[in-house]
Amino acid sequence: MFKRPRFSKGMRFPRFIMEDVLVIFIFMAVFCGVVFFFPHLIVFGDAKIPADPFNTPEHIKPEWYFLASYQFLKIIPSEFGALILMSVAGLLFVFLPFVDRSEENNILKRPIFLTLVLACIVGFIGLTVWGFLS
């Protein structure tokens, strides 16, 4: 009733995996060799300056996706207050679908949801740009 399909003779599965593992090990050996024996090829600029926890250079900034949080922490002087406000903002964004429980699926016909989404997006973009420029 059911015939097993006939496959052409090709590379067997274990050999295929072993060849991939061999290539991965060779790559990792070359990568580790470069990292450990020739670090000057990949480390340059400010990474060569020894760390000083009491003196942070002014030009150092976080990556772009952390700039909004970085700027928010610079605005609010108290770390605890900033933590509370950032937690409330994050929870508001997480529970945003539960705030407006309308039957409508079109976001243009849900003014509360649309307003909150736009406020979150504009706030994040605004803080990111402000953090980049400051």
Image (spheres, helix red, strand yellow):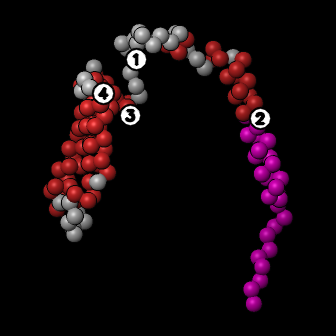
Q: Is residue 98 above or below residue 124?
A: below
Question: In percent of the image, x 31 and y 34: which residue is there?
Answer: 83
Which of the 4 quarters of the picture holds residue 121?
top left
Nearest the eye: 87 or 41: 87
Q: Quadrant of the C terminus?
A: top left
Please tell me which of labels 1 and 2 falls first in the chain.
2
**Neighbour class for label 3 at 10 Å: few (<14), some, many (≥20)?**
few
Q: Secondary structure at mark 4?
A: helix
Give the spatial CA distance, label 4 vs label 3: 20 Å
Q: Which residues are magenta?
A: 1-27
Amino acid at dot 4:
Glu
| Residue at mark 3 | 65
Query: Badge 4 local density, few (<14 within 10 Å), some, or many (20+)?
Result: few
How far is mark 3 from mark 2, CA to CA? 34 Å
Nearest-to-viewer mark from 3 and 2: 3
Q: What residue is drawn where x is 40% and y is 17%? A: 60
Closer to the chain start, of discs 1 and 3, is: 1
Amino acid tagged 3 = Tyr
**In the rendered image, which quarter is residue 61 located in?**
top left
Q: Earlier in the sequence, mark 3 or mark 2?
A: 2
Determine whether label 4 and label 1 are within 8 Å by CB. no
- The tag earlier along the polypeptide, 4 or 2, is 2
Mark 1, other Cα within 10 Å: few <14 / some 14–19 / many ≥20: few
Residue beneath disc 2: 26
Q: Which mark is residue 79?
A: 4
Inter-mark Cα distance, 1 to 2:
36 Å
Asked if labels 2 and 3 touch by Cβ distance under 8 angstroms, the answer is no
